[in-house]
Image (spheres, rainbow, N blue to C red):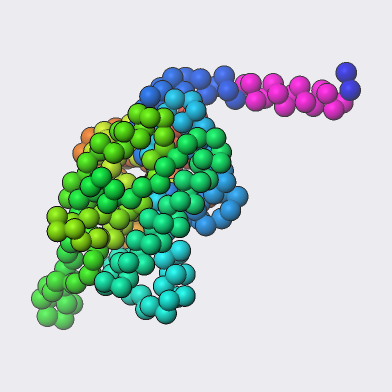
């Protein structure tokens, strides 16, 4: 046997070993609904984007029902810059006026949505791009935020414009797509009772959809390893009570707070578990679902 052939056999044996180890997990998630929030570096870097498309296609091909919710902040920023429209943020939320909401819808429900669907389709699964307005999937209401003046201690209501939050998720469109063997790719744009378009945070939409679908897992791809303790070590698992205690103690801070809150909302609404994991890790979704030691932090009831 030549050296090359021996190396080929060794590599094939290793692949077979990996598949054998994955079999119990494939059985566990057969027919399961997995909601994946896609954004951050995983979306911005081409090789990670290609791997993401392949991973979602693989999930579909092995009998899992993936539902993808995507963001698109950098792409919106680039388009606003091209159109010379100024953008401002309050507590991480983009203040969205009438001109800006048109741009947001155009970018999220258009360019970005179709690009993500195309990544998955090219990898071998049929993906269909939709937004929360399609079929009245996401009925939204205007998001209100208050801010306390540190001097006077008086709270004032902040006007974020056409920024919304999910009021109701109608899962019929999602079930129709998954039941037809398709992968839904959802842009976080919703519609109000009066027909007004609302820009909604993608993490919030993912949490609401995972809860409404009673998903087996919500996977939140981020640019950090997961929830870290005070010594900056990854915490593999948290309960809802642990999350509340972590926020109260100051262990969970900053931008991680809304992420864990959306995970908690999903779990309280019926999802079996929600995972915050690093989308910069190659094949993060597969590692989380099909190996014993997933790379992120899972939040359970």
Q: Is residue 10 above or below residue 84?
A: above
> Quarter-wise, where is residue 20 in the image?
top right
The residue furthest right is: 2
Q: Is residue 120 above or below residue 259?
A: above
Instruction: Tell me where residue 263 appears, x and y as whole percent.
Output: 29, 45
Residue 232 vs residue 72, the one in the foreground: 72
> Quarter-wise, where is residue 210 in the image?
top left
Q: Is residue 4 magenta?
A: yes
Question: With 31 as the anchor, is 159 left or right in this view?
Answer: left
Residue at x 51% of width, y 46% of height: 118
Q: Is residue 69 above or below residue 171?
A: below
Residue 201 vs residue 118, the one in the foreground: 118
Majority secondary structure in the magenta region? helix
Residue at x 41% of width, y 66% of height: 76
Question: With 280 as the anchor, is 208 left or right in this view?
Answer: left
Question: With 186 as the anchor, is 2 left or right in this view?
Answer: right
Number of numbered discs on residues: 0
Q: Could you tell me if residue 134 is visible in this image?
A: yes
Q: Quadrant of the N terminus?
A: top right
Q: Is residue 195 magenta?
A: no
Q: Could you tell me if residue 236 is visible in this image?
A: no
Instruction: Tell me where residue 24 appears, x and y as whole percent.
Output: 47, 19
Residue 130 vs residue 154, the one in the foreground: 130
Instruction: Tell me where residue 39 appears, x and y as whole percent.
Output: 44, 53
Q: Is residue 117 above or below residue 85?
A: above
Residue at x 38% of width, y 62% of height: 106
> Quarter-wise, where is residue 175 in the image?
top left
Q: Quadrant of the C terminus?
A: top left
Residue interval drawn in magenta: 3-17
Residue 232 vs residue 113, the one in the foreground: 113
């Amino acid at each position: 046997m030549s050296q090359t052939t021996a190396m080929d056999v060794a590599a094939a044996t290793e692949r077979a070993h990996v598949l054998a180890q994955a079999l119990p997990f494939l059985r566990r998630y057969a027919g399961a609904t997995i909601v994946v929030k896609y954004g951050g570096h995983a979306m911005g870097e081409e090789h990670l984007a290609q791997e993401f498309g392949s991973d979602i296609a693989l999930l579909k091909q092995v009998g899992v029902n993936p539902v993808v919710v995507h963001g698109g902040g950098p792409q919106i920023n680039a388009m606003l810059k091209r159109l010379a429209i100024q953008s401002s943020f309050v507590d991480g939320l983009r203040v969205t006026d009438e001109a800006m909401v048109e741009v947001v819808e155009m970018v999220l429900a258009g360019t970005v949505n179709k690009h993500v669907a195309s990544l998955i389709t090219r990898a071998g699964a049929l993906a269909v791009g939709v937004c929360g307005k399609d079929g009245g999937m996401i009925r939204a209401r205007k998001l209100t935020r208050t801010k306390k003046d540190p001097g006077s201690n008086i709270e004032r209501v902040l006007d974020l414009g056409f920024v919304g939050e999910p009021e109701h998720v109608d899962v019929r469109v999602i079930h129709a797509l998954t039941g037809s063997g398709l992968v839904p790719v959802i842009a976080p744009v919703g519609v109000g009772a009066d027909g007004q378009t609302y820009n909604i945070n993608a993490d919030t939409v993912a949490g609401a959809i995972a809860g409404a679908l009673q998903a087996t897992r919500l996977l939140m791809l981020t640019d950090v390893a997961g929830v870290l303790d005070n010594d900056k070590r990854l915490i593999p698992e948290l309960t809802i009570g642990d999350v509340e205690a972590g926020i109260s103690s100051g262990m969970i801070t900053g931008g991680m707070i809304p992420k864990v809150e959306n995970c908690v909302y999903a779990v309280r609404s019926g999802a079996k578990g929600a995972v915050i994991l690093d989308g910069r890790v190659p094949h993060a979704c597969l590692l989380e679902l099909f190996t014993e030691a997933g790379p992120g932090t899972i939040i359970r009831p």
